[in-house]
Amino acid sequence: MTDISSQSVPDRRKVRSNGSGPSTNGARQDAPDPCHREELVAYAELLFFAYRDFTSDPDAALEQYGFGRAHHRVLHFVHRHPGLRVANLLDILKITKQSLARVLKQLIDKGFILQKAGNADRRERRLFVTAKGGRLIEKLTSLQVKRIEEALATAGPGARHFTRRFLFAMITQSDRDRVETLIKLPPATNSDDWTEGGK
């Protein structure tokens, strides 16, 4: 696995700066910097490890109910958006109808999610968390919020701003407006710098 220590990329850059490299007719050729690529690969690996630990605490809590991350995501978005339509949930999660149907059935059967027909259109299926489901998702969210809060404090000044900018930029550009609306950013931080340069 790539060495992601702080010394690895600079050290490689020093080795490359000695002027040696492939050339044609004695002229040095411009080529993609392998050090830059190694740095990006290291970021990808850091994202893997960060996500691994970000999900580890709620994963352990979910196992007690025989649930997994798909159940967590359904509970999260239904809790954040009471009355969410099944069609909208499919669009958010980007999973198949069959996969969502299986997860929803388990959550409904065990009393974590309630499904109701829409008021205007009785064919619509609207989803709500029950009191039981609300208690579980609050527990899972608290675990993850605590880890984020500690990471931001450790990262130091400016971490909140740059974390928002980076995460938003990682989202597919055509989906950013919808995500910005969906996540309900608190008014205190809902400023122009949230999407500045990100669209």
Image (spheres, helix red, strand yellow):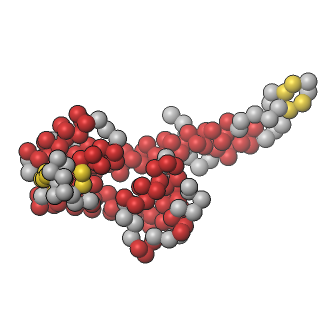
Q: Foreground: 140 or 57?
A: 140
In the rendering, at what x and y percent does residue 195 appear? 53, 61
Farthest bottom residue?
Answer: 188
* Above/below status of 85 relative to 96: below
Q: Tell me which corner region of the image, top left, top right, bottom left or bottom right, holds residue 24.
A: top right
Residue drawn 15% across the image and 51% down it: 122
Farthest top residue?
Answer: 25
Residue drawn 50% across the image and 34% down it: 1
In the rendering, at what x and y percent does residue 38 appear? 61, 39
In the rendering, at what x and y percent does residue 168 appear? 49, 55
Residue drawn 34% across the image and 48% down it: 92
In the drawing, does residue 101 fall left or right of residue 17? Answer: left
In the drawing, does residue 20 fall left or right of residue 178? Answer: right
In the drawing, does residue 40 fall left or right of residue 70? Answer: right
Q: Tell me which corner region of the image, top left, top right, bottom left or bottom right, holds residue 32.
A: top right
Residue 59 visible, this angle: no
Residue 121 visible, this angle: yes
* Above/below status of 125 relative to 183: above
In the rendering, at what x and y percent does residue 4 appear? 54, 43
* Above/below status of 156 relative to 32: below
Q: Foreground: 180 or 12?
A: 180
